[in-house]
Image: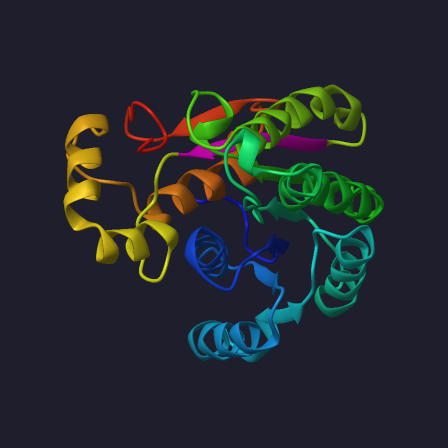
């Protein structure tokens, strides 16, 4: 199936590892040019080197940027547009949590969690729209989480992810006039080397094995590549009538957290 992504210019926030990295790999395989970011320079340099070896130096651009700040998001978008020659696609993938449960989290923790998730998506989308308008349209995917629609885990993270789902649904009719589509993909618990679940599995194998047996009908967590496949399709012209949709990709997982 031709996804129609050859020659497209794509941005991926948080693309140095995990789900973001898998999305970048998919987009490059489809012929797109890709810019990605991470907060730390060294992971960006190493990911850029590896991706360029596989896809070509003129198709991959890495930037160290903190897109959880308005200035960082706007700067990443502007630098990416200059490097790529335009913007057709955006994946707002950065996310994370600050603080513990309600009484162990502060107002600042909630603000930081919303900045990492919802506000990073808002600022990145706002920045790309003028560039997409110049190209006659575009496609956006916000990577939310199972925690955004199934109760469990830290409330600040779940609330921020639920807001991302509503963000895409609310922006879809607003951006449609510019031929810009926006959808949300919500991964379940994803296992990849060096990720949070991988680290916890090393520390507490029995706890994680019990969690998997209890909450995952197929007896395993998902992979970054399985999320990337759905994101890539949602970005593509093959999903041209999909707009404002929320797409869970969680293997029918039950609760999204151990606690």
Quadrant of the image occupied by residue 242: top right
Q: Position of residue 129 (x, y in %)?
A: 80, 42
Q: Is 172 placed left or right of 236 in the picture?
A: right
Q: Residue at x 33, y 24 (%)?
A: 255
Q: Position of residue 238 (x, y in %)?
A: 50, 34
Q: Tell me which secondary structure the magenta stretch mostly adopts.
A: strand
| Residue ranking furthest to the front | 103
Q: Is 208 placed left or right of 63 in the picture?
A: left
From the viewer's side, name the closer residue of 238 and 186: 186
Q: Is residue 216 in the magenta section?
A: no
From the viewer's side, name the closer residue of 98 and 43: 98
Report the span colored magenta. 180-187
**In this view of the protein, can residue 215 be seen by the observer?**
yes
Rendered image coloring scheme: rainbow
Q: Is residue 183 in the magenta section?
A: yes
Q: Position of residue 166 (x, y in %)?
A: 64, 22
Q: Position of residue 258 (x, y in %)?
A: 31, 33
């Amino acid at each position: 199936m031709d996804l129609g992504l050859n020659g497209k210019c794509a941005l991926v926030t948080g693309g140095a590892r995990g789900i973001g990295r898998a999305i970048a790999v998919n987009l490059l395989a489809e012929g797109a040019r890709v810019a990605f970011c991470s907060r730390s320079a060294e992971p960006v340099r190493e990911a850029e080197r590896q991706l360029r070896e596989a896809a070509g130096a003129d198709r991959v651009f890495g930037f160290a940027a903190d897109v959880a700040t308005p200035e960082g998001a706007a700067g990443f978008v502007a630098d990416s547009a200059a490097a790529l020659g335009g913007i057709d696609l955006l994946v707002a993938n950065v996310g994370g949590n600050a603080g513990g449960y309600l009484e162990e989290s502060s107002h600042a923790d909630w603000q930081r969690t919303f900045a990492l998730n919802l506000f990073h998506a808002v600022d990145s989308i706002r920045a790309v729209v003028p560039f997409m308008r110049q190209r006659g349209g575009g496609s956006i995917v916000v990577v939310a989480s199972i925690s955004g629609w199934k109760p469990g885990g830290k409330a600040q993270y779940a609330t921020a992810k639920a807001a991302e789902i509503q963000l895409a649904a609310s922006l879809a009719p607003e951006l449609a006039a510019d031929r810009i589509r926006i959808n949300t993909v919500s991964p379940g618990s994803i296992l990849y080397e060096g990720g949070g679940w991988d680290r916890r599995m090393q520390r507490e194998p029995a706890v994680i094995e019990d969690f998997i047996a209890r909450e995952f009908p197929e007896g395993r967590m998902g992979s970054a590549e399985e999320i990337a496949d759905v994101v890539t399709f949602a970005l593509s012209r093959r999903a041209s009538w999909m707009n404002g949709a929320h797409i869970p990709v969680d293997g029918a997982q039950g609760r999204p957290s151990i606690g």
